[in-house]
Amino acid sequence: MRFLACLLLVALAACAPDGPVLIAPKPLPVLAGPVADSRHLSGDVVLADDVRVLPGAELVLEAGTTVWVRPAGSTKIEPDQLSARTEILVEGQLRISGLPGAPVRFRTLKPQLPVPEGDPLWAGILVLPGGSVHVDHAELPSADHGLWLLGGEAVASDLTLRDCRYGIEVAQGSGLELRRARVRGGELGLFCTGSARLVMADAVFQGQDEAGLHLAPVCRFDASRIEVRDSQVGLVAEDVPAGLKLTGNRIELLRPGGGQ
């Protein structure tokens, strides 16, 4: 009888449908360390640590790419870093090549260390002398700087920055062309600290806690259809340049000496 039962179990097993196939998830591509040649990335990518695009190298983020930023697991600043937070340093070329309906999106993962509410979760994109960034259709949130030009160049269109401490900072000797941009939240929308060249059109800065725009007297600013609204201070500058509209800010214009 036991023998017949065993035969029956074998027969039933042979007739049973195949069991579920367990598929291990494929690890996402990781972006970290130096980029020394030409590298193209698409799909989902993890920015796992600091990235440095070296002189002569090119990093391209293709349309539809989502970059998952892993906040730094340490507060130590290494000798070749400008921040303890995860950062992209550009000495070569960075191309963020989104398209309408397929933007490049930066998203932040859960921090490894406790972060006070509202603090930046990563450093952002820093462009050093000799470096250049070209941005089309991109979304970038929660960085210390969305773009920080430290002597480098950037051309950006259809760019959305949200809740970055400084949306864009432009330092001495840098150049920025910005078109069709939206900068929302954070402390400063755009901060031009020295003799830099800015050409901007069709951009809105909204809801900054300190100021929408802060322009040093030596900053060369060519504006067309730029609006700053709903911020603590609309503009910190000697005067309101042509092409700039200030709307609904608590203080529309604050001159560097404190005058309004």
Image (cartoon, rainbow, N blue to C red):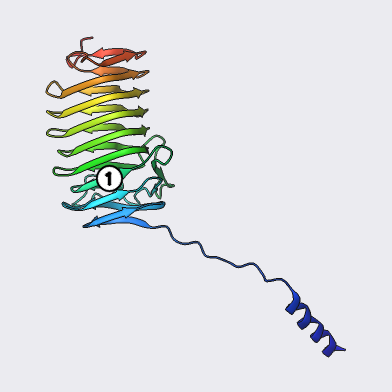
Observer-nearest of 59 and 240: 59
**Which of the 4 image quadrants contains residue 225?**
top left
Q: For the C terminus, which image quadrant?
A: top left
| Placement of 118 over or under 18, stated as above or below | above
Q: Secondary structure at mark 1?
A: strand
Residue at image mark 1: 95
Residue drawn at (31%, 54%) of the image: 40
Q: For the N terminus, which image quadrant?
A: bottom right
Residue drawn at (34%, 33%) of the image: 158
**Which of the 4 image quadrants contains residue 143?**
top left
Residue type for callout 1? Arg
x and y percentages locating residue 133 in the rendered image = 24, 41
Q: Is residue 232 visible?
A: no
Observer-nearest of 75 and 129: 129
x and y percentages locating residue 101 in the rendered image = 43, 38
Q: Is residue 49 left or right of residue 81?
A: right
x and y percentages locating residue 150 in the rendered image = 17, 38
Residue drawn at (34%, 13%) of the image: 247
| Placement of 134 over or under 230, stated as above or below | below
Observer-nearest of 218 and 244: 244
User: Residue reaching furthest top?
Assistant: 260
User: Residue reaching furthest right?
Assistant: 1
x and y percentages locating residue 53 in the rendered image = 22, 51
Q: Is residue 21 left or right of residue 13?
A: left
